[in-house]
Amino acid sequence: MTQPTYQAPQFAPQPEPKRGNGFGVAALVLGIVAIVASFIPVLGTVAFILGPLAVLFGLLGIFLRKGTPRGTSITGIILGALSIVIAIIVTVMTAAFVGAVDDALKKSDPSVSNAAPAVESPAQGASVPPSEAPADRSADFGGTVKYDNGVSVTVKSLGFTKVGQYATGAVEGQAAVFELTVHNGSKEDLEAVLMSVPNVTHGPKNAKASMVIDSSTDLGLQTLSTILPGESQTVKFAAGVPKTSAGSVRVEVTGPNMFSDKDAIFKGAVK
């Protein structure tokens, strides 16, 4: 009698190990650290470094690690962009608070006399000169608004530019770009951080435009800092303005002292 033959069992081949996305993980970690740091006034500047890095590593994870999960890369990009926006807002609010405290301390300085100045009655028949009208606080794009303390503000329209795929706030893949220049003609240091975030509106109803952040073109990442007497600083900023409203655009820049100075207003068309 012949002995039956037995065949060895067939085993399915082992699946190939999944490739990891190191760039995506790095983007996620940097994004988490940046978003946490952005809420802390002192550490908020860290977000300006880690946020763009998170966006960069996230993009590398998407384009260089094809075939790998993209969830960590996308999450890292979102967290990095949000951390930059939050850090700007927190920095502006902190600067406003510090400025208010500084002004309050100056006003409460005992070295300043509280006595009312003597007022002399004008001689009979003498003419009293009219009081000076306040300086105009509006100008067309390219013009300059000057304040009584010597600070001047200039806003130029640089037209439209295309932005990257992952830019935030853009309209139809493009943004209206502006150049802001602040000159400190006063005798004191100017804390100009608040002036870095203008309010942009457009159209007949002054619809509010979103500020554009695009790491690929360095838009939305520049801020003014302390400007010494006699010096100037220039930054670029961008807003999501539809071309249908490009003929009527309004930019409002916070005054040197947000509590006592009116905003500088610039109007015109973006071409």
Image: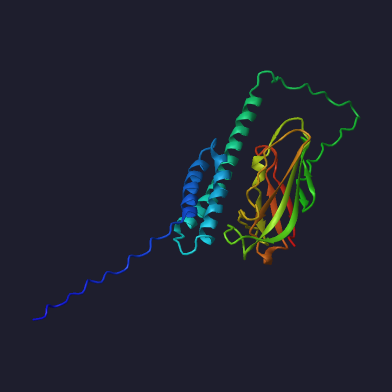
Q: Viewed as shown, does residue 259 lie left or right of 72?
A: right
Q: For the point 71% across and 19% down, which residue is it?
A: 115
Look at the picture and state if 223 lies above or below 105: below
Q: Viewed as shown, does residue 260 lie left or right of 49?
A: right
Residue 219 in the image, given as x and y percentages of width and height: 65, 53
Q: For the point 56% across and 47% down, which residue is it?
A: 84
**Where is residue 117, by image quadrant?**
top right
Q: Which of 135 and 215 is in front in this view?
A: 215
Residue 7 in the image, given as x and y percentages of width and height: 21, 74
Can the viewer see residue 259 in this picture?
yes
Q: Nearer the viewer, residue 173 or 71?
A: 71
Query: How many numbered discs sit on the rendered protein?
Result: 0
Residue 3 in the image, given as x and y percentages of width and height: 12, 77
Residue lying farthest to the left in this orientation:
1
Q: For the point 56% across and 53% down, which residue is it?
A: 56
Residue 150 in the image, given as x and y percentages of width and height: 78, 36
Q: Which quadrant: the N terminus?
A: bottom left
Can the viewer see residue 75 in this picture?
no
Q: Which quadrant: the C terminus?
A: bottom right
Q: For the point 53% across and 50% down, which residue is it?
A: 54
Q: Nearer the viewer, residue 118 or 227?
A: 227
Look at the picture and state if 173 lies above or below 95: below
Q: Viewed as shown, does residue 47 lie left or right of 69?
A: right
Residue lying farthest to the right in this orientation:
125
